[in-house]
Amino acid sequence: MTLLDFERSNVASIAANQRQLEMLISDMKARRPGGAYRDILRHRLAELWLSNETGRLLSYRTAWMQEAGRIANYEASVIKVFATELGAKITNFGVNQLGPAGYLTRV
């Protein structure tokens, strides 16, 4: 088992995604969009949140396998791709939600 196998559980990526989602949720609460647009945003945020929870559980499974002495090569690869794509989706949603001001907002 190599060092690369141990550092690929990607819990940090999932945690960063969760922080980003929490900031988007607090921004949505502050702006209080109305009507059907609010429902669309809520459903999209819920979908992203559930995807992040799935990634968190995959990361925990990878860490559990590493703790048990098993080699988690393909699991680590799956969670890496999953977390990276999810991070891109969350970022895209955030930029679309915040609009042009989203590029200038300090995080």
Image (spheres, helix red, strand yellow):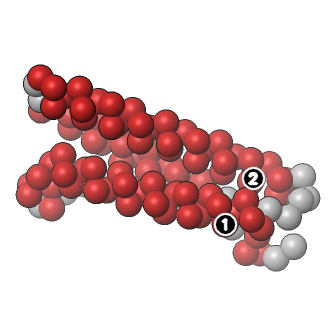
Q: Quadrant of residue 66?
A: bottom right
Vertical placement of residue 17 versus 30, above or below: below
Instruction: Name the image quarter holding the C terminus.
Output: bottom left
Instruction: Name the image quarter holding the N terminus.
Output: bottom right
Query: Pointers 2 and 1 in contact (CB under 8 A)?
Result: no
Secondary element under disc 2, as helix, strand or loop, is helix
Of marks 2 and 1, which one's residue comes earlier in the chain?
2
Q: Could you classify mark 1 by the number of other residues whose Cα lies within 10 Å: few (under 14), some (14-19), or many (20 or more)?
A: some
Vertical placement of residue 3 versus 42, above or below: below
In the rendered structure, which amino acid carries the disc numbered 1? Ser
Q: Nearer the viewer, mark 2 or mark 1?
A: 1
Q: Mark 2 sits on what residue? A: 63
Number of numbered discs = 2
Q: Residue at x 90, y 52 (%)?
A: 68
Q: Quadrant of residue 77?
A: bottom right
> Residue 77 shows which numbered tag?
1
Q: Residue at x 19, y 51 (%)?
A: 96
In the rendered structure, which amino acid carries the disc numbered 2? Ala
